[in-house]
Amino acid sequence: MGSEQPAWIGAAVAVAVILSIEALAGHVDTALIVSAVLALVAGGLLGRTRRPVTLPPREPGLPARHAVAEALLANIPDPVILVDRRVVVMEANPAARRLLPGLKLRHPLSFFLRAPDILDGIEEVLRTGTSLTVDYVARVPTERAFAVQIGALPMPDGPSGGEPNIVLFLRDLTEARRLEAMRVDFVANASHELRTPLSALLGFIETLQGPARDDARAREQFLGIMRTQAQRMTRLIDDLLSLSRIELREHVAPTRPVDLARIARQLVDMQAPLARERGIELTVEAPDTPMRVLGERDELLRVIENLVENAMKYGGSGGVVTVSLHRLDRTGGRPDRIELRVADAGPGIAPEHIPRLTERFYRVDVASSRQQGGTGLGLAIVKHSLNRHRGRLSIESELGRGTTMRVTLPEYRPEPAEAVPVQE
């Protein structure tokens, strides 16, 4: 038997390594790797030695199988805890120790994990031998949600104490639930934003087909309102499509240089008639020399357009909106950057709203935003577009003293051998 044992070990290790590689490639669930580790444990890897799952230097005479099991458990990203029939902790991997900092071996699990559903689940698995899954929410230091898979290990108690009889595998669902909540909120908000103008359109159509069929004055008034509502729906759909396109390409960085100063001047020229109509002085301050960044002209034009439109809609009461560009010197190992500022002298924004301004459909004043024709997606589009351009948006505001939106982008400085044409 002694001569056959190394071959068994090698086969088990080979299986575990293959599963690890497959998991990294996304082909095998992490729980399958845990199963492979538990198979090694059941073969006696942890039967004779009681010690935390860490990676200290190999001690003389330490069984090779024990070291392999520790290494595999240590590299499983989700928390794994082994307990015996008395629900005493026998082993735990580093992820479990990070989740439960006070966790100690050979102490009851209930000392560190106050979750009645999990403890009741362990008792049921010990009684029936059937695996089950329960939910667990850790609220300290931040709230995290887990699906806890409780499985039985049919192993007898050894002479030196209880062998691991139960494995707890905690799968972190926090990010998945956050994304699901965002998806639900997004669908609900988009549906609401589309339903409101659609309901108005249907109401006016029914009125024109009925009581106002022969009323020329009412017809002209209603058609004007219907056109406004249809334009609102068009803006919302356009913004939704723009946001979707940007998110799909967010991981692909642009590679062609553009002159940000020229784009800003073009945008100000385009918005000048609207600014005059609203009684706003819209100006641009930029050096005569090109200010190049790697980017897509249309996306950057949309970024500046959204910032300027927001400034005119919500800060235009101050009468002045200024677009300015500056070069920022290299700091902390970062490359030279171009900073674009859009500043207004309006009423400002309360500090509690600033962190949420780039969320989809978030508005400081819902009624005012809808009255101004806003969709609630403008700053979300700006944020995702800047992520693609490796840029950054910061918002500075004080009640009664206006708002400044700052966009910073890495400056493009070609090597002497490069000759990439600048997008017009």
Image: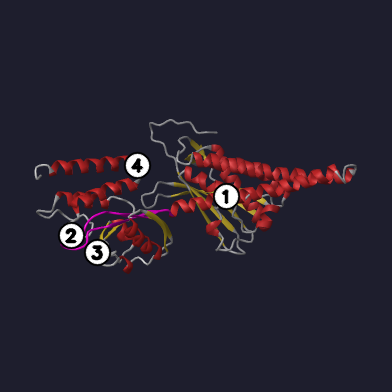
Mark 1–mark 2 Cα distance, whole angstroms, equals 55 Å
Which mark is on residue 186? 1
Label 3 close to label 2 by CB (< 8 Å): no
- According to the picture, the residue beneath numbered tag 4 turns out to be 28
Q: Amino acid at mark 1?
A: Phe
Q: Nearer the viewer, mark 1 or mark 4?
A: 4
Which mark is on residue 264? none
Q: Is residue 320 visible in this depiction of the protein?
A: yes
First in residue order: circle 1 vs circle 4: 4
**Secondary structure of residue under mark 2:** loop
Q: Nearer the viewer, mark 3 or mark 1?
A: 3
Residue shown at 37% from the left, 60% from the top: 121
Q: Amino acid at mark 4?
A: Val
Residue shown at 56% from the left, 60% from the top: 353
Q: Amino acid at mark 2?
A: Gly
First in residue order: circle 1 vs circle 2: 2
How many marks on residues? 4
* Colour basis: secondary structure
First in residue order: circle 3 vs circle 2: 3
Q: Magenta residues?
A: 149-173
Residue shown at 71% from the left, 46% from the top: 198
- According to the picture, the residue beneath numbered tag 3 turns out to be 105
Q: Is residue 279 above or below residue 349?
A: above
